[in-house]
Image: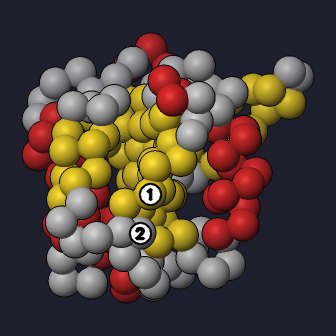
């Protein structure tokens, strides 16, 4: 998505920084929205620009895209929310390396986290005291921190 709102940008930036600080120079690294994820479902090739993602497998890294993300985060906006919740959720589940998919609202304080290990069941976090557990990267992040300054 081009022309993201300032709220969208701040939320994505906070998540990127939190992931980068937590992961340091280890094998897992965060990426922002200018890096695509590329994958196949049957014979169809798909390319999306997730808002934030984490990948640990450098083998799947190419010049402009990644093939093996571990965590994908989409910041919901009115124009993309239905696609993020339905189409992308279904398509992303076909990526064998993907462990978690997070949907982060920008107009409300709400994070929905889906995990492969939970059969993609949604866990919703809304209260400022809730702590979002990104188990795929071993990071617990208070929802208040995600929305700080937003």
The residue positioned 27% from the left and 84% from the top of the image is 150
Tell me: 143 left or right of 103.
left
Q: Nearer the viewer, residue 34 or 43?
A: 43
- Image position, residue 101 (x, y; %): 50, 43
Whether residue 11 is situated above or below residue 29 in the rendered picture = below
Q: How crowded is the residue under tag 2: few (<14 C-alpha within 10 Å), some, or many (20+)? A: some
Q: Which mark is residue 110?
A: 2
Residue in the image at 39% along x and 18% along y: 57
Q: Could one spot residue 38 in this view of the protein?
A: no
Question: Which quarter of the figure has residue 53?
Answer: top left
For marks 2 and 1, give the CA distance: 7 Å
Asked if marks 2 and 1 touch (Cβ < 8 Å), the reply is yes
- Vertical placement of residue 31 versus 100, above or below: below
Q: Position of residue 2 (x, y in %)?
A: 57, 74
Lower sequence index among marks 2 and 1: 2
Residue at 57% from the left image edge and 52% from the top image edge: 49
x, y (%) of residue 125?
37, 60
In the foreground, 116 or 83: 116
- In percent of the image, x 69 and y 27: which residue is there? 94
Disc 1 crowd rating (10 Å Cα; few below 14, some 14-19, many 20+) is: some
| Residue identified by numbered label 1 | 124
């Amino acid at each position: 998505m081009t022309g993201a709102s300032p709220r969208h940008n701040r939320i994505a930036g906070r998540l990127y920084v939190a992931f980068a600080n937590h992961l340091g120079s280890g094998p897992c690294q965060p990426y922002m929205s200018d890096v695509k994820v590329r994958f196949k479902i049957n014979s169809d090739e798909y390319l999306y620009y997730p808002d934030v993602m984490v990948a640990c497998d450098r083998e799947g890294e190419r010049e402009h895209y990644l093939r093996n993300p571990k965590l994908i985060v989409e910041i919901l906006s009115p124009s993309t929310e239905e696609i993020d919740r339905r189409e992308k959720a279904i398509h992303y589940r076909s990526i064998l390396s993907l462990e978690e998919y997070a949907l982060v609202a920008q107009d409300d304080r709400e994070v929905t986290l889906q995990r492969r290990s939970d059969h993609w069941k949604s866990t919703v976090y809304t209260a400022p005291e809730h702590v979002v557990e990104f188990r795929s990267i071993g990071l617990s992040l208070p929802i208040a921190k995600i929305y700080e300054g937003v």
